[in-house]
Amino acid sequence: MPSIRFRLNGVATEIVADPASPLLSILRGELGLTGAHFGCGSGECGACRVIVGDRAVTSCDTPLWSVAGKDVTTLEGLGNPERPHPLQRAFIAEQAMQCGYCISGVMMSAAALLMQNKRPSEAEVRSALDRNLCRCGAQNRMVRAVLTAAEEMDAP
């Protein structure tokens, strides 16, 4: 089997696997990163979103070969308990989650948005999160959390 090289959460990574393997199965099964969740398996729910380059993608339908030579960021790469990312702090402060299943995908969509647009409008945030399914009803709090994080990240 061929070797695929990419940067994962800022670290050079090399995986020997079937290039057609879904990125999600490599992240969870081979690398032990469980932040991205398996939801629908067809790229529709957003629970498995990660950032490739500066775009949020569904990792369940992203083949491993397509990330060769690229930067991949998972929820684990955003922050940690000692130094949480502004999005993580804002989601906690706004109580913008309930069951938590969709949250990693939502945060990755939001992080990709903030990489591309430091001061998004509410409508832009809603649009960026639109493809992340959440059944808990915390969407308004999620939008507030993203806007709060954007303010913090843009502050001098």
Image (tube, helix red, strand yellow):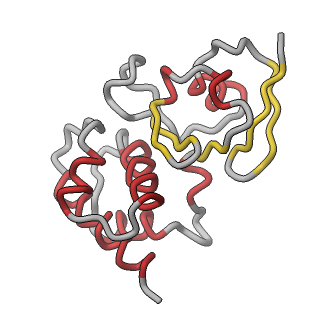
| Image-based side of 15 in relation to 104, left or right | right
Instruction: Give the residue drawn at x 51%, y 67%.
Output: 85
Q: Is residue 40 above or below residue 37?
A: above
Nearer to us in this view, 80 or 18: 18
Instruction: Give the residue drawn at x 45%, y 42%.
Output: 56
Percent across and percent down for residue 3 are 83, 21
Nearer to us in this view, 32 or 4: 4
Which quadrant of the structure image shows residue 153? bottom left
| Image-based side of 42 in relation to 115, left or right | left
Which quadrant of the structure image shows residue 63? top right
| Image-based side of 109 in relation to 29, left or right | left
| Numbered label tally | 0
Instruction: Give the residue drawn at x 39%, y 62%.
Output: 117
Percent across and percent down for residue 16 are 82, 20
Identity of the residue furthest to the bottom in this view? 156
Percent across and percent down for residue 34 are 57, 37
Q: Is residue 20 above or below residue 38?
A: above
Which quadrant of the structure image shows residue 116? bottom left
Give the quadrant of the N terminus: top right
Instruction: Give the residue drawn at x 36%, y 47%.
Output: 106
| Image-based side of 23 in relation to 107, left or right | right
Q: Is residue 39 above or below residue 21?
A: below
Percent across and percent down for residue 135 are 20, 37
